[in-house]
Image (cartoon, grey):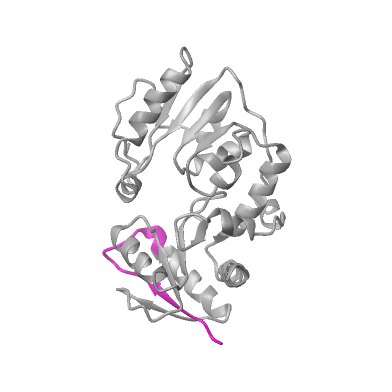
């Protein structure tokens, strides 16, 4: 049976440059994967799959809930976990990040990880600084967690007296600090890789920084996101466990070109069929 996919491209919701660059190859990739794909500017509910970019948008959140409420799958796309941010986009089924169940159903095939030419490092220092990673404006509103950062910073200060606690606020798309919490020791500029050197712990809600910390060998405490599948079992996984996670994760991100997007849709079709 031919499956249909409705691509939501609402100019007033999720209309970033990244989403506009994502749409053409993702649409063609779906067609090349054998799906009957079409675009709409407002949700019609006529596709088996719903495909959208940026579930944090209020309108996208609402129509996504409506679609999966019918027992139908949605492909939720956003910026990639690893690799160049202008090249890779990530995907999940029904929510912002792949659930524990989807991660379990993903084969730890290293092929996609190896193409990134990345390697693990060991930057952990048990006496080093603690990094508290902030949330973006949309995430705060979407998750109703307006005071999460403040509470985590205060908690970290109490747990680690004398330890340097660094606040890493999220930047919005205009590269302006998107922080609610005034904190005397914050890191806005510079790479996250440099900030992770010599760190003792990363505390985040669901940030991609948890993935960076996995590569860097820095312990993580997180409450959600893709990395929660790994760190829910402990803050200091082994090298084997870290690689197992990264191998799986790389099957949930794809390059913005027709060929790789076809692979992405083929993966989504396969993994969702295995999970049904």
Q: Is residue 213 left or right of residue 43?
A: right
Q: Please say whether residue 133 is visible from this viewpoint.
A: yes
Q: Position of residue 194 (x, y in %)?
A: 54, 30
Residue furthest top as drawn: 162
Write the residue at 42% across / 79% down. 47
Q: Position of residue 193 (x, y in %)?
A: 55, 34
- Total marks in image: 0
Can you tell which quarter of the image residue 237 is in?
A: top right
Q: Is residue 183 left or right of residue 130?
A: left
Q: Quadrant of the N terminus?
A: bottom right
Can you tell which quarter of the image residue 40 is in?
A: bottom left
Q: Quadrant of the C terminus?
A: bottom right
In the image, residue 2 sits, relative to residue 159, either above or below, namely: below
Q: Which residues are magenta?
A: 1-19
Write the residue at 70% across / 55% down. 108
Q: Position of residue 46 (x, y in %)?
A: 38, 81
Q: Is residue 173 magenta?
A: no
Q: Is residue 8 magenta?
A: yes
Q: Is residue 199 left or right of residue 242?
A: left
Q: Position of residue 189 (x, y in %)?
A: 42, 32
Q: Please say whether residue 227 is visible from this viewpoint.
A: no
Which of the two residues, 24 or 160, is positioned nearer the viewer here? Answer: 160
Q: Is residue 244 left or right of residue 25?
A: right
Residue furthest bottom as drawn: 1
Write the residue at 51% across / 53% down. 80
């Amino acid at each position: 049976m031919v499956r249909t996919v409705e691509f939501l491209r609402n100019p007033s919701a999720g209309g970033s440059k990244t989403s506009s660059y994502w749409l053409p190859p993702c649409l063609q990739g779906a067609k090349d994967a054998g799906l009957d794909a079409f675009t709409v500017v407002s949700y019609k509910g006529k596709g088996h799959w719903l495909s959208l970019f940026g579930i944090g948008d209020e309108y996208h959140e609402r129509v996504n809930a409506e679609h999966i409420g019918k027992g139908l799958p949605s492909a939720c796309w956003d910026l990639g976990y690893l690799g160049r941010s202008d090249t890779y986009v990530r995907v999940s089924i029904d929510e912002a990040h792949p659930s524990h169940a989807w991660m379990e159903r993903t084969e730890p095939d290293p092929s996609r990880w190896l193409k990134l030419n990345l390697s693990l490092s060991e930057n952990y220092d048990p006496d080093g600084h603690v990094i508290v990673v902030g949330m973006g404006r949309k995430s705060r509103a979407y998750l109703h967690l307006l005071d999460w950062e403040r509470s985590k910073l205060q908690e970290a200060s109490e747990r680690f007296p004398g330890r340097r606690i660094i606040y890493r606020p999220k930047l919005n798309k205009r590269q302006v600090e998107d922080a609610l919490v005034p904190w005397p020791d914050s890191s806005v500029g510079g790479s996250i890789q440099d900030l992770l050197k010599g760190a003792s712990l990363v505390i985040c809600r669901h940030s991609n920084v948890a993935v960076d910390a996995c590569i860097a060998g820095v312990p993580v405490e997180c409450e959600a996101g893709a990395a929660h599948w790994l760190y829910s079992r402990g803050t200091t996984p082994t090298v084997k466990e870290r690689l197992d996670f990264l191998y799986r994760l790389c099957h949930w991100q794809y390059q913005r070109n027709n060929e790789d997007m076809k692979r992405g849709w083929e993966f989504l079709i396969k993994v969702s069929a295995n999970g049904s």
